[in-house]
Image (tube, rainbow, N blue to C red):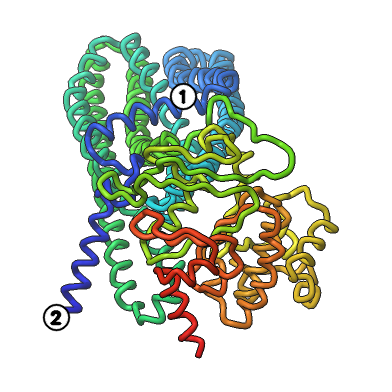
């Protein structure tokens, strides 16, 4: 029973993420009415911005549509002329008028075909160009948003934005706009022609408009909510799928397959129900429009037939009126299909507009300040730095710290003390709430992003290797480096021998996340990458904590080379790593409680000395 209650609670939390604005703590997912209204405005602005470079092509597409519509509207009129002015002369032995009208009908059909083909070709080019630019912008935005954004915005939702949401917009672009413009033109043109052909019959047709208006207004309101729910539930399906596969080892290790399957089945069922609601709405609206149209055809046929018998209307006019009337209601059905695509695409566009509107918490400076050049650089200074991931929970409070150029500083302390936060602030993944952090006298907020990334490199315990060759991963931070430079970097940190022993040497494919290499080998490749990038400041965040003893010894030898003549911050729990430092900082509660060379702190009988004794005893 306990397991069932826990499973139900977990499922409820997952379902709550569909509408909870704090699920990813992002403005892009804020579902409040005010936020939705703002997103609608921004989504329309985004659409206009995407279409603006294609104004000339859009003008050409409109011209082709006008030609297509004119040719299509000529058909029933030519039928009317053929009945009223072609059949009489044909009976008298003169086929010329009917032949001429048939030729005109064929010419109109050819013009409609050519214009239609040209429009579809041109609109496809515009649509694909818009989608290409939209995907480029979304991907580029995700790349440039700071780490703080990615820490709260799940990868599954990112996948959803770039796949299902863009696909919804693609469905609209590929056929929806066509249906909208063609249907609207047809309805307006047909309405004018009906009034011109026979005003009394057109007046009878107007009787259907109140019902059509009510039906359309109901569908508009109901479908807006339904399609937004569809976008939210499909995002949950993708999020759960991505998170389950990313954590597949934990899922299988803790035998979570059944529970994860139940959660997936539930959110998948929610998506199915949300989709069914949209289909049910369409199933009421589209047949409703057709039913109203059929009733009006019957009414017009009865009323018009009576007028034909009374001599008030020609047979050809009634035939043409009925053909045009059918062309009036058919576009309304097309508009219902367009509205399905429009609502889905609008909901998706709102999500994408929210992502593109997300502003970086660590913006680029308007006027970047260059770092000073020359030898002896890499000095760091923290001045009264305070920072917290949440406003009410500070992690660092008034931190004062000076790190001279070329010094290796080890940060140690309990979990949550603020060590990794210091590293993230130096890498400018976040900016301090108060105070300043400077590199060689320049505030990090005044440095251009490209220069900062060249100057500061972070190596973590799970340094990511990308699919590709070993050489490609080493030159990741310096893409222009030649093979000789890559080999020299690998030799310098002691990775050349194991790389040369691989099946294809430096061209060996490391596979997904470096799965072809051991943990120690992956870390050596990461060190070679950092060595080749040659930063002023190197940050090692638990870079050896996941290694076994033989691998750690291999990496330790590389550290001496990597850290030589550069400023380094080393965060470590293993004191074997700390021993290479020039200086040790013991951090606790966001403050530095001990500071000095490791040899002196060992004899000072403080926190570092106690940690050192515990580590030494564990080795005996």
Location of residue 261 with respect to 223 vertically, above or below: below
Residue 587 is at least partly visible in this image: yes
Q: Is residue 376 left or right of residue 56?
A: right
Q: Disc 2 vs disc 1: which is toward the camera? A: 2
Question: Which residue occupies 71% across, 60% down?
Answer: 474
Q: Nearer the viewer, residue 211 or 616?
A: 616
Question: Which residue is label 1 attached to?
Answer: 48
Question: Which residue occupies 34% across, 25% down?
Answer: 328
Question: Which residue occupies 63% across, 78% down?
Answer: 551
Q: Secondary structure at mark 1?
A: helix
Instruction: List x then y, in percent, for residue 91.
Output: 49, 17
Tag shown at residue 1 = 2
| Mark with earlier residue (2, 1) | 2
Asked if the residue under mark 1 is in contact with the one under mark 2, i.e. CB atoms within 8 Å, the reply is: no
Image quarter of residue 306? top left
Instruction: List x then y, in percent, for residue 602.
Output: 49, 71
Instruction: List x then y, in percent, for residue 522.
Output: 64, 70
Question: Which residue occupies 20% across, 24% down?
Answer: 208
In the rendered image, which quarter contains the N terminus? bottom left
Q: Nearer the viewer, residue 408 or 161?
A: 408
Location of residue 190 with respect to 261 vertically, above or below: above
List the single residue furthest toward the right: 484
Tag shown at residue 356 = none
Location of residue 215 with respect to 58 vertically, above or below: below
Instruction: List x then y, in percent, for residue 41.
Output: 34, 26
Mark 1 Cα-neighbour bin, 10 Å: few <14, some 14–19, many ≥20: few
List the single residue furthest toward the bottom: 620
Q: Is residue 366 left or right of residue 149?
A: right
Q: Secondary structure at mark 2?
A: loop
Question: How far apart are the alpha carbons under marks 2 and 1?
Answer: 55 Å
Q: Nearer the viewer, residue 314 or 330?
A: 330
């Amino acid at each position: 029973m306990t397991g069932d209650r826990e499973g139900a609670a977990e499922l409820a939390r997952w379902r709550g993420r569909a509408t909870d604005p704090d699920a990813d703590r992002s403005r892009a997912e804020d579902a409040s009415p005010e936020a939705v209204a703002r997103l609608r405005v921004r989504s329309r602005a985004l659409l206009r911005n995407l279409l603006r470079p294609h104004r000339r092509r859009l003008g050409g597409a409109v011209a082709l549509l006008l030609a297509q519509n004119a040719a299509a509207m000529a058909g029933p009129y030519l039928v009317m002329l053929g009945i009223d002015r072609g059949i009489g002369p044909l009976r008298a032995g003169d086929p010329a008028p009917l032949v001429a009208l048939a030729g005109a009908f064929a010419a109109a059909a050819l013009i409609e075909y050519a214009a239609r083909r040209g429009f579809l070709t041109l609109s496809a080019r515009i649509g694909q160009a818009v989608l290409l630019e939209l995907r480029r912008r979304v991907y580029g935005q995700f790349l440039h948003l700071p780490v703080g954004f990615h820490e709260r915005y799940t990868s599954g939702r990112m996948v959803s934005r770039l796949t299902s949401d863009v696909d919804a917009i693609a469905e609209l672009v590929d056929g929806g706009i066509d249906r909208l413009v063609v249907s609207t033109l047809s309805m307006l043109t047909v309405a004018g022609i009906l009034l011109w052909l026979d005003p009394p019959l057109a007046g009878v047709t107007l009787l259907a408009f109140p019902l059509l208006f009510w039906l359309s207004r109901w569908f508009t309101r109901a479908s807006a909510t339904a399609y937004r729910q569809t976008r939210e539930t499909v995002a949950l399906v993708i999020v759960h799928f991505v998170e389950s596969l990313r954590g597949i080892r934990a899922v299988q290790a803790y035998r979570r397959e059944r529970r994860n399957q139940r959660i997936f089945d539930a959110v998948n069922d929610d998506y199915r129900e949300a989709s069914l609601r949209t289909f049910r709405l369409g199933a009421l609206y589209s047949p409703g429009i057709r039913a109203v149209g059929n009733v009006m055809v019957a009414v017009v046929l009865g009323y018009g037939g009576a007028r034909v018998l009374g001599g008030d209307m020609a047979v050809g006019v009634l035939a043409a009126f009925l053909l045009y009337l059918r062309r009036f209601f058919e576009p309304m059905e097309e508009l219902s299909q367009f509205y399905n695509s429009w609502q889905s695409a609008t909901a998706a566009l709102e999500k994408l507009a929210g992502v593109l509107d997300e502003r970086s918490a660590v913006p680029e400076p308007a006027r970047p300040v260059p770092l000073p050049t020359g030898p002896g650089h890499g000095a760091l200074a923290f001045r009264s730095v305070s920072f917290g991931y949440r406003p009410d929970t500070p992690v660092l409070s008034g931190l004062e710290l000076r790190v001279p150029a070329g010094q290796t500083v080890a940060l140690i302390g309990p979990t949550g003390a603020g060590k990794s936060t210091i590293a993230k602030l130096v890498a400018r993944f976040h900016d301090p709430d108060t105070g300043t952090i400077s590199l060689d006298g320049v505030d990090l907020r005044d440095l251009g992003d490209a220069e900062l990334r060249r100057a500061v490199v972070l190596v973590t315990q799970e340094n990511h290797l990308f699919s590709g060759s070993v050489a490609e991963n080493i030159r990741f931070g310096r893409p222009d480096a030649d093979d000789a430079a890559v080999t020299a970097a690998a030799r310098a940190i002691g990775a050349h021998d194991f790389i040369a022993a691989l099946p294809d040497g430096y061209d060996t494919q490391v596979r997904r996340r470096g799965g072809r290499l051991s943990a120690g080998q992956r870390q050596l490749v990461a060190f070679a990458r950092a060595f080749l990038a040659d930063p002023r400041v190197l940050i090692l965040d638990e870079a050896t904590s996941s290694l076994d003893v033989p691998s750690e010894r291999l990496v330790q030898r590389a550290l001496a080379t990597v850290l030589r003549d550069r400023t380094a911050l080393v965060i470590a729990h293993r004191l074997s790593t700390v021993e290479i430092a020039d200086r040790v900082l013991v951090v606790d509660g966001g403050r530095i409680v001990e500071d000095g060379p490791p040899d002196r702190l060992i004899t000072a009988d403080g926190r570092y000395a106690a940690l050192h004794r515990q580590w030494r005893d564990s080795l005996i």
